[in-house]
Amino acid sequence: MNHTLKKSLVFAVIFILLCSLVPLTLLLSSNKNNNRKRNEQNPANEEKLILGFSQIGSESAWRTRNTESIFEAAEANNIQIIFDDAQQKQENQLKAIRSFIVYQVDVIAFVPIVEDGWDNVLQEAKDAGIPVIIVDRQINADSSLYAGFLGENGFEEGFSAANFLVKKCKDKEGPVNILELYGTENSSVVINRAEGFRSVIKKEPRYNIIRTENGDFLRSRGKEIADKIIQENGGFKLGNTKIDVIYSHNDSMTLGLLDSFNNNKIAPQDFIIISIDAEQKSIDALVRGELNCVVECNPNLGPTLMKLVKEIAQGNPIAPVTYMNETIFTEDDDFSTYTPRGY
Ligand code: AHR
C-alpha cells in the first residue's frame, strides 16, 4: 500500500468515527444547558423557551382540538414543547412531570386527569425552581405550589345547562326525571359540572336525578350505556319510570347515546338532551333537532397559555385563575350565519 493511500484510509477511518460520535453527543447533550448553548450558536433560537406539557390523552374530538391549539400557539410564539401523552393515567403524568424537572424545562403545564395526588410532584417542581401552570382541569393542592390555572369554569357550565332546563320546563307539570352521564371519575370538571347543575335544580324538588352513569367521556361508553338501558327496560326508561332529560357532561358521550337511539329507532325528540363541549357534530345534531342545548367548553386555550408562559418566564406573576370565554347554544338560536366550530 503506498503512502498516499495509507493516509487517505486513516483519514476515512477518523471521519467515520467522528460521524458515529455525533448522534451520541447530541443525545447526551439533551438538557437545558446544552440546549441553551445550541441556542447561542444559533441566534435565531436564542430566546426559545422550553415548555414541558403533559396532556391526558385523546378521548374526544374536544381533547384533540385542545392539544392542536397548544401546539399551534407554541409554534406561533417560538416556544418549544416537550410533549407527553399520559394515555389517561395519572402515574404517566407524574412520570412525565418528573422528567420535565430533570430536563430543566423553563415552564411545566399539565392537564390534571384527577383532582388529587399532585402535592409531591408540585413541591419537586417548586424546589427545582420550575413554575407550573395547571391547564383545563383544576386540582386540590395548595395554591403556593403552582403559578396559576387556565381553563374552563366547570361549575358555570353545569349551572348554564340546568338554567336552560329549568327555563325549558317552566310550563311542564309534574316531576322531571334526569339521567346524568358523567366523565372521568374524580376529575374536577366532572365534580364542578355536577355541582353547578345541582345548585340550580335543587331549588325545585320536582327535578330528580334518577340515575347517574360514568361514561368516561367516551363515545363508545355513551352508546354502551344507552344500549344497556334499552335492552334491560325495553325502551329508554328505567323500569316504569320515564326518563325526561339526559344531561351529558360531554359531546362524545352524547353522540354515542344518539348512535344507540338511531340503531334502536328511538326518537331523540322525545327527550330533552343537554350536552357540553360544542363540537361541530353536536351543533349539527342541535340544528337537526336531536339536541336541545349545547354548552360550550372552549378547547382553544393555546394562545392564552403561551401568553402566560412568557409572562412567567420573564419573572412576572400571573392571575391565579384564568377562565376561558364560553357560550351556550340552544334550539332557539339562528345558525344560518354562525362560524363553524373547527373541532
Ligand atoms: O376537561 C374537559 C373535558 O374533557 C371535555 O368536556 C371533554 O370532552 C374532555 O374529554
Image (cartoon, rainbow, N blue to C red):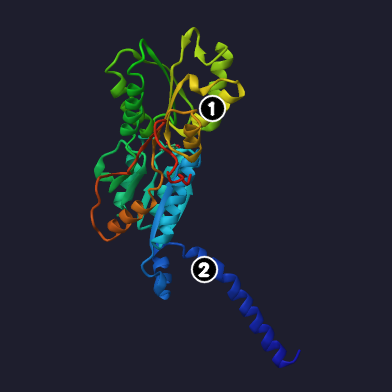
Most extreme residue toward the top is 240
Asked if residue 172 lies left or right of residue 215, the reply is left
In depth, the one of 21 and 299 nearer the eye is 299
Question: Circle 2 sits on which residue?
Answer: 25
User: Does 251 appear above or below 80?
Assistant: above
Tag count in the figure? 2
**Location of residue 200 (image quadrant):** top left
Residue 159, horizontal then vertical, whole percent: 31, 29
Work out whether residue 40 or residue 178 is closer to the camera in this orientation and state it.
178
**Place of residue 23 in the rendered image (x, y in percent of width and height, measured from the top left):** 56, 67
For image coordinates 27% across by 18% down, the residue present is 203
Which residue is denoted by mark 1 in the rendering? 258
Residue visible at 33% across and 38% down?
138
Which residue type carries mark 2? Thr
Q: Which of pointers 2 and 1 lies earlier in the amino acid sequence?
A: 2
As drawn, 1 above or below 291: below
